[in-house]
Image: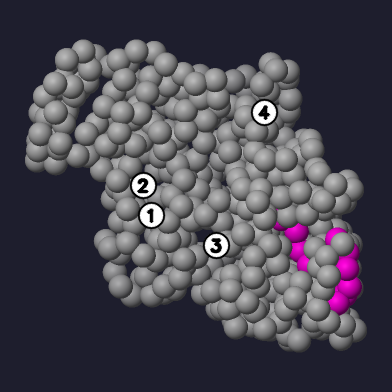
């Protein structure tokens, strides 16, 4: 049944996005829906970036977050002339753009170098111990975490946390059409027992949390949250908004019933989200041709990327596809955290999946004309240590393992007005530090906001109503054509 509470009610920490969308329970669409849909009706004062090249050129973002820290030397930035204990096992290969090489682990992506730019000078110096969650929090919120325990672990997520980027986008760039503004899948960000840090709306309130599809898109997806049901008892009709039996066969009657209550525009959008079926259709991968699904790869990550394409095509503003693993999981299964073994997992598991999926996504979106106004970003929270078998973060490493390395790594950007077939920044001879144009993670986040037409320097109010910059970073204007 679809149930709308009849009184104003709001928990101290707000409602979750899933509570808004549940169908079949009494918590659906609690009257915090205005907090979900009443984002910002009017634009703020003109941005100083207005008129700058690339500003506002993107309508949506797909963030492929490779949590765990993929090795930049073994994927994006090979160093064939470095000593063997740095260059590793893989050889460089040419791409379809002169002067750009990738590791041999990326044979498919090498054929699409004319569709993206590599930022080879990502870099930051951590304060104290550096771990996955601290780096993830900084990358996605634009601020360093407030508390890190002696073990290096962060405190659990808090309503006082700085909002993740997708939540800020959902608030600052509200959708006009009924569609989910921010979707995260297929698993939460995690390091050990710390789950979801840096992945929530924080002080914006749970109304801006992502719609969390924590399911494997390579398997049948349960869309109970977005499906209309017909088992509405008659006694629930009084003093509430109700649906008649046989919902799926009586859409006109439902639309008439809803409009007769003169809901305000935000409540109307909530109903429209269900009535339009856009979200349900976007999640239905069975509508894709089998050969398209095979091209992306029948893996969790592959089908997640295809789902991301379908979501932005349907109007979603921000899709975050997390590499399907806990940050410090087993590298022989699905984690980029290659302390114990680096080359085997990369060669046999990680890179074939990433290569196939990312190349298919870029090619598919290019052919559909979606890259023009969709910014695609693929990056992890840091890279891996250039020297093999050494400890840089307090972790133990096998002779062929690489440890955490935030001092230099690589990110891929494409679409949304970004220049393509180029390199931005340069690392030194061993991939240890930037040689040209260092880029802090907050600069990349500022660039994402910039591409969407959001002034990254604008002020926002935190949970104490204190003004804070949206992100303390400088957008990479030179990335745009």
Label pair 4/2, CB-CB below 8 angstroms:
no
Stretch in magenta: 381-393
Say which residue label 1 marks. 310
Could you say where residue 63 lies in the image, as x and y percent from the top left? 57, 53
Residue 114 is covered by the magenta coloring = no
Count residues near mark 3 (Cα–Cα under 10 Å), then give few for <14, some for 14-19, many for 20+: many
Image quadrant of residue 121? bottom right
Say which residue label 3 marks. 324
Dot 3 or dot 1, earlier in sequence = 1
Closer-to-camera residue (78/382): 382
Dot 3 or dot 2, earlier in sequence = 2
Residue 320 visible here: yes
Residue at 71% over, 50% down: 133
Residue at 32% over, 53% down: 222
Say which residue label 4 marks. 160
Dot 1 or dot 4, earlier in sequence = 4
Dot 3 or dot 4, earlier in sequence = 4
Is residue 127 rendered to the left or right of residue 298?
right
Label 2 vs label 1: CA separation? 6 Å
Label pair 1/4, CB-CB below 8 angstroms:
no
Label 4 vs label 2: CA separation? 32 Å
Closer-to-camera residue (345/166): 345
Label pair 3/1, CB-CB below 8 angstroms:
no
Say which residue label 2 marks. 314
Residue 387 higher or lower than 231, as above or below? below
Q: Mark 2 falls on what kind of element?
A: helix
Label 3 vs label 2: CA separation? 23 Å
């Amino acid at each position: 049944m679809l149930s709308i509470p009849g009184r104003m009610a709001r928990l101290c920490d707000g409602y979750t996005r899933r509570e808004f969308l549940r169908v079949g329970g009494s918590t659906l669409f609690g009257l915090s829906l205005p907090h979900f849909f009443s984002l910002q009706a009017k634009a703020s004062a003109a941005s100083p970036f207005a008129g700058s090249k690339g500003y506002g050129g993107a309508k949506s973002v797909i963030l492929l977050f490779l949590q765990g820290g993929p090795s930049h030397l073994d994927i994006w930035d090979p160093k064939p002339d470095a000593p063997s204990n740095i260059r590793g096992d893989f050889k460089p290969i040419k791409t379809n753009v002169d002067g750009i090489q990738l590791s041999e682990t990326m044979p498919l992506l090498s054929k699409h170098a004319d569709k993206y730019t590599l930022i080879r000078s990502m870099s930051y110096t951590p304060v104290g111990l550096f771990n996955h969650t601290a780096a993830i929090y900084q990358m996605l919120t634009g601020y360093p975490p407030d508390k890190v325990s002696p073990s290096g672990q962060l405190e659990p997520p808090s309503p006082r946390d700085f909002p993740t980027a997708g939540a800020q986008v959902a608030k600052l760039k509200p959708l006009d059409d009924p569609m989910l503004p921010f979707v995260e899948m297929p698993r939460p960000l995690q390091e050990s027992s710390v789950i979801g840090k840096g992945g929530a709306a924080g002080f914006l309130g749970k109304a801006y949390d992502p719609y969390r599809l924590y399911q494997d898109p390579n398997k049948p997806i349960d869309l109970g949250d977005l499906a209309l049901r017909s088992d509405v008892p008659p006694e629930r009709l009084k003093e509430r908004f109700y649906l008649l039996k046989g919902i799926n066969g009586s859409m006109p009657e439902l639309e008439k019933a809803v409009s007769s209550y003169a809901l305000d525009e935000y409540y109307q959008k909530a109903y429209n989200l269900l009535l339009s079926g856009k979200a349900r259709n976007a999640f239905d991968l069975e509508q894709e041709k089998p050969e398209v699904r095979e091209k992306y790869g029948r893996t969790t990550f592959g089908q997640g990327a295809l789902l991301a394409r379908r979501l932005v095509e349907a109007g979603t503003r921000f899709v975050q596809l997390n590499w399907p693993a806990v940050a410090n999981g087993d590298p022989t299964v699905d984690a980029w955290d290659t302390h114990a073994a680096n080359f085997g997992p990369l060669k046999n598991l990680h890179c074939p999946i990433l290569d196939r999926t990312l190349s298919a996504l870029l090619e598919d979106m290019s052919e559909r004309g979606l890259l023009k106004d969709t910014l695609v970003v693929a990056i992890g929270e840091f890279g891996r240590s250039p020297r093999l078998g050494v400890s840089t973060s307090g972790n133990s490493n096998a002779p062929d393992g690489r440890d955490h390395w935030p001092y230099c790594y690589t990110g891929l950007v494409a679409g949304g007005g970004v220049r393509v077939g180029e390199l931005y920044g340069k690392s030194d001879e061993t991939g240890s530090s930037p040689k040209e144009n260092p880029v802090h993670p907050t600069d990349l986040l500022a660039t994402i906001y910039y591409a969407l037409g959001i002034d990254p320097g604008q002020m926002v109010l935190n949970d104490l109503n204190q003004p804070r910059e949206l992100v303390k970073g400088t957008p990479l204007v030179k990335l745009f054509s």
